[in-house]
Image (tube, rainbow, N blue to C red):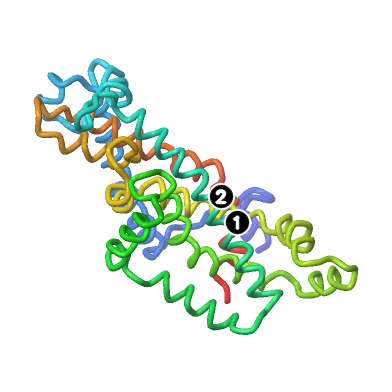
Amino acid sequence: MGDATAAMSGPSGAKPRRRLSGRNIMVYGILIVMCMYYILPLWVMVMTSLKGMPEIRLGNIFAPPVEITFQPWVKAWSEACTGLNCDGLSRGFWNSVQILIPSVFLSIAVASVNGYALVNWRFKGSDLFFTILIFGSFIPYQVMLYPIVILLREMGLYGGLWGLVLVHTVFGMPILTLLFRNYFSSIPEELFKAARVDGAGFWGIYFRIMMPMSLPIFVVAMILQVTGIWNDFLFGVVFTKPDVYPMTVQLNNIVNSVQGVKEYNVNMAATMLTGLVPLVIYFISGKLFVRGIAAGAVKG
């Protein structure tokens, strides 16, 4: 009897094979369909961007290029016309970088201090302050466009890069404050009390204790802000002028140009170039992003 059991279980130490149940097949099938749903458009974009226009006119959008060419990428970066200028996306790229860096730094710096103060240094009216911040994150942007235009004009910032930096900083604070507040509330309160007993003040605790322990949530905030600010079109087209348009507005001008032949390969290359920065940042710091979410970014 023992020999029969051993024979049925297979060689010594070998694990029995797990059969796929109907439920597993359904789950894997759904995952494959969803992957194809997202991968196919990306495949078409990449393949089209590497083809010349004669090959594109043959109509087989899924086929890889017979002869690979990077000329569409070169033209999209430095030669395509975006209105009166024909310098491609390069000018818009550097405009976006100048907008992105201070916006991300300022919004995260202010929001992290807000979240830290709301958790560990509660003041009179702190609950009302937090409620107003959260309420602000649900107000549609379109409702506030015209008042902000008037405000920036009175401040002398309308049409420039710093006006857009201010807008992104203000609009990023509510949701980031919520993230930092929830994350800091998950840190043991004993650490804060021990630091107070040792004589550490507001900024000492923030820089020496809170910041070193909060790298994952800072990465979460950075990815959210980089993605939102870099991909923004509405604020860029409303609050800036053609000389300082961000990359997304330049992309729109290239794709929707009505002059000359519609160059689909250049349009696809321009789209890929515009989305490259947030993709690279996410792939580099994706593990920390997941850690930040799992460690308390959505608690509270």
Amino acid type, label 2: Phe
Residue 292 image offset from top left, x and y in percent: 60, 59
The answer to whether 64 is drawn above or below residue 211 in the figure is above
Q: Quadrant of residue 160?
A: top left
Residue 254 image offset from top left, x and y in percent: 21, 34
Secondary element at image label 2: helix
Q: Residue 109 bears which disc, if any?
A: 1
Residue under circle 2? 105
Label 1 CA crowd tier, 10 Å (few <14, some 14–19, many 20+): some
Q: Is residue 289 visible in this depiction of the protein?
A: no
Nearest to the observer: residue 49 or residue 94? 94
Q: CA gap, disc 2 to disc 1?
A: 6 Å
Amino acid type, label 1: Ala
Residue 151 image offset from top left, x and y in percent: 36, 60
The answer to whether 19 is drawn above or below residue 118 in the figure is above
Q: Residue 46 bears which disc, if any?
A: none
- Residue at point 48% right, 56% down? 169
Residue 135 image offset from top left, x and y in percent: 43, 76
**Left or right: 173 with respect to 146?**
right
Disc 2, disc 1: CB below 8 Å?
yes
- Residue at point 10% right, 25% down? 261
- Residue at point 61% right, 62% down? 112
**Left or right: 4 with respect to 48?**
right
Label 2 CA crowd tier, 10 Å (few <14, some 14–19, many 20+): few
The answer to whether 298 is drawn above or below residue 215 in the figure is below
**Left or right: 297 with respect to 253?**
right
